[in-house]
Image: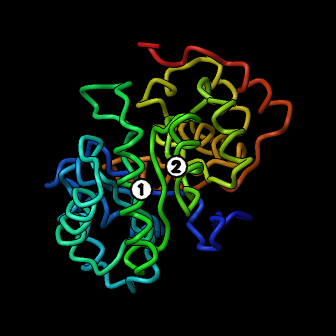
Amino acid sequence: MKETHFTFHNNVTIPYIGFGTWQIPNDEAYPAVTMALKNGYTHIDTALAYRNEENVGKAIKDSGLPRESIFLTSKLPASIKGYDETINAFNESLANLGMDYLDLYLIHAPWPWDEIGKECTKENIESWKAMEKLYHDGKIRAIGVSNFSIKDIQALIDTCDVVPMANQIPFYIGRDQKDLVDFCKKNRILVEAYSPLATGDILINPEIIAMAKKYDVTTAQLSIRYCIEKDTLPLPKSTHESRIIENSQLDFSISPEDIKTLDAIKDVRKND
């Protein structure tokens, strides 16, 4: 593939595709991450809230690969806000993973998941200042956010020293979040695309299935490739080795005309 990595605004590089571990239980995380690493993935994404950090870290250690060859992300739980609280949660993640540092650490969401939309700007700023401290101390190579809106990110830019390096958001065919993505690009914030298959709903969309056949690829491959063509970093996940391999085999390009067709698709989610 011509792509190998994206580069954050602090010149740290991140592999162009990540292996996501959301919804993978701790007992399944070890074999899943082991399979991913064995099959060429060097970017692993987890979170304290996933409750699988222990086996994610163990799989990385047992792989025999040098730590510096793996890009590892974890996240501050959405319900944890504040300076000291952030430091403590970060240290808990490091201990769970058995690591000395993280490559990327994200605020998982601007509000607790059971209070979506709650005003937490002040608390997010305090958490961000703690992350800046950890970043400057060399404990994290890059810092960012997840599920943050333009308003949420602007509050950090206006009050803090370090512009977020990444914003991890749901991004897939039918949900391109154009205004937010444009804002991130303008501020040199890398967009990471989680749920690039719309948690599976894309796989039954007839238009996308038809286009995948045109390129002689799977529907999943086309959908993941779409994210890359849109300059976002996809985070597919699976616990099946054949799909783990398949999801990284993206050595093709989608024509500009077909990108426009995919851009026009809406309502791929059954619950949207």
Residue closer to the observer: 268 or 114? 114
For the view shown, which residue lies furthest in the right direction?
A: 257
What's the mark number on residue 112?
Answer: none
- Is residue 76 depicted above or below 40 in this figure? above
Residue drawn 48% across the image and 69% down it? 40
Instruction: Please determine whether, in this image, residue 72 is positioned above or below residue 49.
Output: below
Residue 38 in the image, given as x and y percentages of width and height: 39, 71
Earlier residue among tags 1 and 2: 1
Q: Residue at x 28, y 47 (%)?
A: 81
> Looking at this view, is 58 or 88 the one in front?
88
Residue 156, numbered circle:
2
Kindly identify the amino acid type of the residue bearing the numbered disc 1: Trp
Whole-percent x, y for residue 213 in the image = 67, 32
Extreme-left residue of the structure: 27
Check disc 1 and report the residue beneath it.
Answer: 128
Total marks in image: 2
Name the colouring of the figure. Answer: rainbow
Q: Position of residue 198 (x, y in %)?
A: 47, 29
User: Are the residues at dot 1 and dot 2 in contact (C-beta closer than 8 Å)?
Assistant: yes
Classify residue 242 as left or right of residue 47: right
Is residue 195 rendered to the left or right of residue 87?
right
Q: Secondary structure at mark 2?
A: helix
User: Pointer 2: residues within 10 angstroms few (<14), some, or many (20+)?
Assistant: many
